[in-house]
Amino acid sequence: MKDLHITFAKKYTDAVLLIFLIILAIIPRVISLDVIPFGLHGDEAITGLEAQKLLSEVRFEAYSGTALGQPIGPLYLTASIFKIFDPSIFTIRVSMAFYGILTVVLFYILMRYFFSKTVSFFTSLAFSFSLYHIHFSRIGFMLISAPVFEISSLICLLYSIKTRKWMYMLIAGITAGMGMYSYNTFILFPLSIMVFLLFAPQDKIKKRMQNLILFCSGWIFLSIPLLWTMLTKPEFYFQHHRAISLFSSPEFLEQKTALLKAIFLLKQIPSNYYHFFSGRLIDYVDGFGAFYSFDYFTLLLLFIGIGIAIYYRHVFGLFALFSILLTTISLVFTINGIYRRQILSLIYIYWFLGFTYSKIEQLKNQNLRHILELIMIFTIIIFAYINLQTYFVNFAQSHDSQSTFSNQLVQVSSILNTSSRSERILFYSNRWSCKYETLQFLLENQNCTDKSDEFSLPDEHIIELDTTTSIVLLGSYKNKITELKLLLPEHNVFPIYSDREKKETDGYVLIAE
């Protein structure tokens, strides 16, 4: 009977741990998803608008010109969810949260290829509760789908090398090809795999070339629609790359000589890498970085693991280091997007955490090993709690994050959508227009007119405004509220707040009774 229990435990422990990980991954990625972050970012709204477009037109496209240009593979999941449930902030975000949850599961499976159940579980727990991954799992940015295909491809590749079954190498390439439709920077991943297959120690050069051909065949075959777009519509496809290129920035172009340009470029490297690993520099495009990106414990184990991998020339460790350097190369050559563009490096950073943990597990001194293991587990749990506290309290209440996610427009849309008498909207704002994607996605009444360059309500139009028009005043235009209340006393006035706590008024919506 004892042997039966041992066999059962060995056989099903991984399944139990995976179920537990899934539950733990779901909680921080779904709870209060429609209100944290507070608002709806324009790029999230683009995800919703494009998904609705897919449903209405029923088409297949590899690439969209929205948000300066992006692959649209993840939109098909969002569109499927929209078909079952109503389009909303929650359904946009939950479609991307699904990829975040799936990444945690796949990450555990990848770690089990190298490490014990204990190391794999607690490393996956640290990964799941990292501030970085929690944030990008909770917003409707499609980049969070990229690690799903990255890890899936790695698992198939490693399994193929282990079992010498060529079919899995082909599947690894196919999976990498699917990843090309997830995020622009994914193209760096298959490049890193090609280097790995060429230089990783294997029996013969012939076997390396066979694996390389198999992988590339699957990758290229699945990538044909996207590669065709690159070749036939380069102006369309590369508009995003031009917009974010450091070489197109005014600061770079101001440098008069090649030497000055090189010096300017070199100065970007330490500061950008520092901010990526430490945070402390908010990216107003996605609201991340105000606090930190990685906790110091993770960074410590990362650098220890890198040192050990270099010292022992650990094959996958050296590949992981190379991949981190390759996938963070955009820190040197692009502007903005300092955090999200490095999403592919995340799994390698946490792999090194597990690698360092595994070396502790291999210590011969049992007393020392048990003490260090307890410290590891305790520290991982403590930092998981700190990350949750930082995100759901500090970040959620941060004025910068709430401003980045355009929470005022969510309030405006909610108020206007409840007014059945509103036939047209006059929109006044220093920051937004009626064409801003958040309004286009959330606002049911699309008869909206931008009036921000002027402010005039002649007396002869007051009667017309009384019965058909709602007025939105945001930013500095809120100062006109006194004047409008006198001109339109029959209108109800609804305040718009700049924060969740409703401490600061940022505008008003006037709706006829």
Image (cartoon, rainbow, N blue to C red):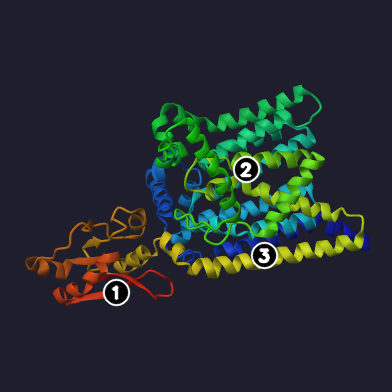
> Which kind of residue does numbered mark 3 sit on?
Phe
Task: Decide which of tag 1 and tag 2 comes sooner along the chain.
Answer: 2
The residue wearing badge 1 is: 494
- Which element type, helix, strand or loop, lies under badge 1? strand
Residue at the image position 63 percent from the left and 41 percent from the top: 325
Number of numbered tags placed on the structure image: 3
Image coordinates of residue 233 in percent, x first then y, are: 41, 30
- 383 horizontally vs 447: left or right: right
Name the N-terminal-most of marks 2 and 3: 2
In which quarter of the view is residue 121 placed? bottom right
Q: Secondary structure at mark 3?
A: helix
Q: Is residue 285 visible?
A: yes
Residue at the (70%, 59%) spot, across then down: 297
Where residue 222 sits in the image (x, y, percent)?
Answer: 56, 33
Circle number at residue 150: 2
Task: Provide the residue designation for mark 3.
Answer: 383
Check the image and name the residue furthest to the top.
Answer: 206
- Whether residue 337 sits left or right of residue 306 in the image: it is left
Q: Which residue type carries mark 1?
A: Phe
SS at badge 2: helix
Residue at the extreme left: 460
- The amino acid type of the residue labelled 2 equals Glu
Distance CA(mark 2)–CA(mark 3): 26 Å
Q: Assess disc 1: are there few (<14), some (14-19) or many (≥20) residues with their C-alpha within 10 Å of its C-alpha.
A: some
Evaluate if marks 3 and 1 touch, with contact meaning CB atoms under 8 Å apart. Answer: no
Q: Position of residue 11 (x, y in %)?
A: 82, 55
Q: For the C terminus, give its image quadrant.
A: bottom left
